[in-house]
Image (cartoon, rainbow, N blue to C red):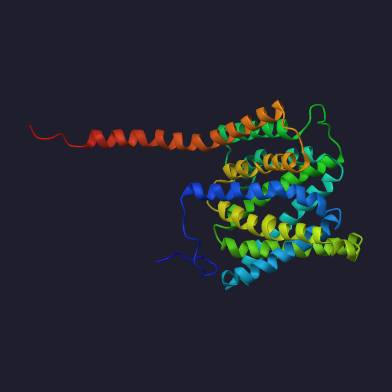
C-alpha cells in the first residue's frame, strides 16, 4: 500500500533511486543558471519586489491547479505556517539578492550567493545540533573557491553595500534549504511548494505596491517581457521549485546545497552562450575545483558506508560454524 503524508492523508511521492533526486537538483540549477539572463532583462521592466511578487503568485496559482489534490486537508495552522515560513524566506532571499545586484557585478552576485553551501552545515549545527563533518566543510570551501574563480574577475573582490546584501541573501537561501528539508519530513512536499509560491508572491506584491513605482503598461505588454515572465513563472519558479523541494526531501542538506551551488556555473555558461563571455583558464580551474568538491561530497559517504559494512561482514564470517570434519 502506498504511504500517505502524516498531516494531509495524501499519498507521498513514489520513492525513486537516490541518484534521481540529485539529478532533480542538477536540473533545477541548469534552469536557474539560464534564468540569470532572463531576470536581467525582466527587472528592467518591473521593479524587484513587484517582479518577484508577480512571478511567484502566478506560479502558485498554476501549481494550485496542477496539485490541488495535494492541498486536501492542508488548511490547518501547522501546514499553512510552514508554507508561510517558506514563502517569507524565499521572497526575502530573492528580493535581497536583486537589491544587491543593483550595486554589484553579476559575477560577484552569483559567487557571494553561492556561499550558502558553506553556511548550510553551520546553520544545521546551530539549529538542530547536527555537527558538520570535515568533509562537509572541506567540500563547501573548495566549491566556493571554484565558484570564485569562475564568477569573479581578478582584482575585483572588494566589499560594498551590494556585496553585503548578497551575503545576506545567501543566509536566507541557506535557511530555505534547511526549512524545505525539515518541513517535508512532516508535510506533503508538493503542497508546501504551492503555499511557498503563493505566500512568497503575496509578500512581494505587498512590498512592491507599497514601496515601488508602477511600470508603464506598454512595457509590461511587450512580447519580449511576457516571454521572459513566462520562463520565470513556468520554469524558473514552477518546475525548479518542484525539482528542488522534492530533491531536498531526499538528499542531505549539506550535499544538496553543494549541488544547488552549480547554479552560478550554469549562469556563467549562459553568459558565454548569450553574451559572448570568453572562457578563460581561470574559469576552467574553477570548474575543476567545483567538480572535485562535488565528487568528494558524493564519494566520502559511500566510503564510510563500505568501511562500516566490512567489520560487520567479518564478524558474521567468524560466527559461521565450521563444517563437520
Q: Which residue is drawn at 71% across and 33% down?
A: 150
Residue 322 or residue 256, whichever sits in front: 256
Left or right: residue 193 compared with residue 51: left
Q: Where is residue 199 in the image (x, y as percent from the top left)?
A: 72, 64
Give the quarter of the image for residue 245.
bottom right
Task: Depth check: give the residue in front, 253 or 268.
Answer: 268
Let me know if residue 235 appears in the view.
yes
Instruction: Count the marks.
Output: 0
Q: In which quarter of the image is the N terminus?
A: bottom left
Q: Position of residue 321 (x, y in %)?
A: 17, 36
Residue 276: x, y in percent?
77, 38
- Residue 13 is left or right of residue 27, and the answer is left
Q: Up-down: is 215 above or below 92?
A: below
**Left or right of 253, for residue 198:** right
Query: What residue sits 77% from the left and 33% below the top?
Result: 152
Give coordinates of residue 91: x percent, y percent: 75, 56
Q: Quadrant of the C terminus?
A: top left
Q: Quadrant of residue 101?
A: top right
In front of the other: 277 or 31: 277
Residue 133 visible in the picture: no
Amino acid at each position: 500500500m502506498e504511504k500517505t503524508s502524516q498531516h494531509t492523508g495524501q499519498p507521498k511521492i513514489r520513492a525513486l533511486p537516490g541518484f534521481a533526486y540529485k539529478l532533480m537538483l542538477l536540473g533545477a540549477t541548469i534552469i536557474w543558471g539560464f534564468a540569470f539572463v532572463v531576470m536581467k532583462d525582466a527587472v528592467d521592466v518591473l521593479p524587484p519586489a513587484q517582479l518577484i511578487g508577480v512571478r511567484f503568485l502566478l506560479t502558485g496559482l498554476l501549481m494550485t491547479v496542477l496539485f490541488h489534490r495535494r492541498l486536501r486537508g492542508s488548511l490547518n495552522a501547522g501546514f499553512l505556517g510552514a508554507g508561510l515560513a517558506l514563502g517569507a524566506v524565499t521572497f526575502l532571499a530573492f528580493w535581497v539578492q536583486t537589491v544587491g545586484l543593483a550595486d554589484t557585478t553579476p559575477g560577484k552576485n552569483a559567487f557571494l550567493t553561492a556561499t550558502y553551501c558553506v553556511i548550510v552545515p553551520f546553520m544545521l549545527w546551530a539549529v538542530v545540533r547536527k555537527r558538520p563533518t570535515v568533509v562537509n566543510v572541506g567540500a563547501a570551501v573548495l566549491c566556493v573557491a571554484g565558484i570564485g574563480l569562475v564568477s569573479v574577475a581578478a582584482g575585483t573582490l572588494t566589499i560594498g553595500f551590494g556585496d553585503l546584501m548578497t551575503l545576506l541573501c545567501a543566509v536566507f537561501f541557506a535557511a530555505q534549504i534547511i526549512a524545505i528539508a525539515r518541513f517535508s519530513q512532516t508535510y506533503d512536499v508538493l503542497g508546501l511548494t504551492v503555499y511557498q509560491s503563493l505566500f512568497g508572491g503575496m509578500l512581494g506584491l505587498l512590498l512592491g505596491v507599497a514601496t515601488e513605482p508602477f511600470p508603464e503598461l506598454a512595457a509590461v505588454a511587450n512580447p519580449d517581457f511576457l516571454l521572459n515572465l513566462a520562463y520565470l513563472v513556468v520554469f524558473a519558479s514552477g518546475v525548479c521549485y518542484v525539482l528542488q523541494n522534492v530533491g531536498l526531501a531526499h538528499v542531505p542538506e549539506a550535499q544538496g546545497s553543494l549541488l544547488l551551488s552549480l547554479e552560478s556555473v550554469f549562469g556563467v555558461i549562459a553568459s558565454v552562450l548569450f553574451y559572448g563571455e570568453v572562457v578563460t583558464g581561470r574559469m576552467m580551474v574553477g570548474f575543476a575545483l567545483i567538480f572535485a568538491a562535488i565528487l568528494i561530497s558524493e564519494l566520502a559517504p559511500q566510503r564510510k558506508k563500505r568501511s562500516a559494512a566490512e567489520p560487520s561482514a567479518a564478524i558474521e564470517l567468524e560466527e559461521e560454524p565450521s563444517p563437520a570434519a
